[in-house]
Image (cartoon, rainbow, N blue to C red):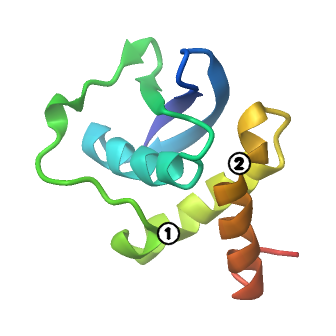
Amino acid sequence: MRSYRIYFRDPSGPVMGRTDFSAENDREAFRLAHVLWSSCSDVVSGYEIWCGKHLVSDDCLSGPLPTTLAQLSYENQERIIAYEHVISTSLWAISRSKRLLREIDELKLMSLIPR
């Protein structure tokens, strides 16, 4: 596993939040990051993925990116749930995303994350 960091940006460019995550490779990092971004896209317009000092390019992609948990493997769903929980409890502006908070509430109802 490699360590990555996603930076969430608002329409004018400033960073609204960030979180670290792990992925097997750049392609998987983009898949996971896109689902994370989708869950809070009501307050951010884009994202960047970094692996250390390297800005990860989307050259590794082929085909559409997933936008929901259901489109990921069970293992990656569990990881995304954990990352979303971290984002929702952070002090970053992104933690106030209504879409993210709704998704967290739904996951709590399904007992996938602690209440």
Q: Residue at x 64, y 58 (%)?
A: 99
Residue 16's place in the image compared with 23, above or below, is above
Q: Which mark is residue 89?
A: none
- Residue for badge 1: 77
- Residue for badge 2: 97
- Residue type beneath disc 2: Ser
- Give the spatial CA distance, label 1 vs label 2: 20 Å
Query: For the C terminus, which image quadrant?
Result: bottom right
The percent position of residue 43, horizontal first and vertical second, equals: 63, 39
Look at the numbered disc 1 and give the secondary structure of its residue. helix
Tag nearer the camera, 1 or 2? 2
Classify residue 91 as left or right of residue 58: right
The percent position of residue 86, horizontal first and vertical second, equals: 74, 50
Q: Residue at x 59, y 46 (%)?
A: 42
Task: In this rendered view, identify the residue nearer to me: 58 or 23.
Answer: 58
Task: In this rendered view, identify the residue nearer to me: 113 or 46.
Answer: 46
Residue 82's place in the image compared with 14, above or below, is below
